[in-house]
Amino acid sequence: MSTVELTKDNFDEVVSGNDFVLIDFWASWCGPCRQFAPVYDAASKRHEDLVFAKVDTEAQPELAAAFEIRSIPTLMIVRDNVAIFAQPGALPEAALEDVIGQARKLDMDEVRKSVEDAKQK
């Protein structure tokens, strides 16, 4: 699947309409972002069942602010409308594959329960 460009107009539709979305927050002037781009694109070809998306933080400052993005690139993974991973920095291919593998293995019922428990405290 090709990478989807996320904007404030399509963000909710893409994220809520898919079970598993990886989001790369980036900017064209960012050297590490440009280094990470081919790694991210290659992973999108290996994992065609997942949605790979990008947010250009320069074009979409509202989205960057909403997710409190302070450093780019930042990779975020959303499963079942729950952000389960967010980390700044360009990941090497092996690390990205490891993160995807771990995210696939998560029991989302347990994650939702943890989120609810945390809200009640």
Image (cartoon, rainbow, N blue to C red):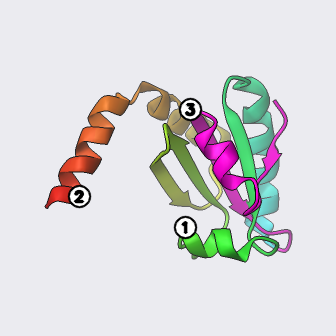
**Can residue 61 be seen in this snapshot?**
yes
Dot placed on the residue nearer the N-terminal end, 2 or 1? 1
Q: Residue at x 76, y 70 (%)?
A: 60
Task: Find residue 11 and report its image quarter.
Answer: bottom right
Crowding around mark 3 (Cα neighbors within 10 Å: few <14, some 14 to 19, many 20+) is: some
Q: Position of residue 115 (x, y in %)?
A: 28, 49
In the picture, measured across the screen, residue 26 lies left or right of residue 101, that is right
Q: Which residue is mark 1?
A: 67
Q: Is residue 36 magenta?
A: no
Tag 3: amino acid: Asp
Separation (CA) of disc 1 from disc 3: 19 Å
Q: Is residue 20 left or right of residue 3?
A: left
Where is residue 58? Give x, y as percent: 79, 75
Q: Secondary structure at mark 2?
A: helix
First in sequence: mark 1 vs mark 3: 3
Tell me which residue sits at (31%, 30%) in the image: 109
Q: Which residues are magenta?
A: 1-29
| Looking at the image, residue 27 lies above or below residue 91 | below
Label 3 residue SS? loop
- Distance CA(mark 2)–CA(mark 1): 18 Å
Which of discs 2 and 1 lies nearer the camera? The answer is 2
Q: Which residue is denoted by mark 2 in the rendering?
A: 119
Q: Amino acid at mark 1?
A: Phe
> Mark 3 highlights which residue?
19
In this rendering, does residue 69 appear at all?
Answer: no
Magenta-colored stretch includes residue 11? yes
Q: Position of residue 88 (x, y in %)?
A: 56, 63
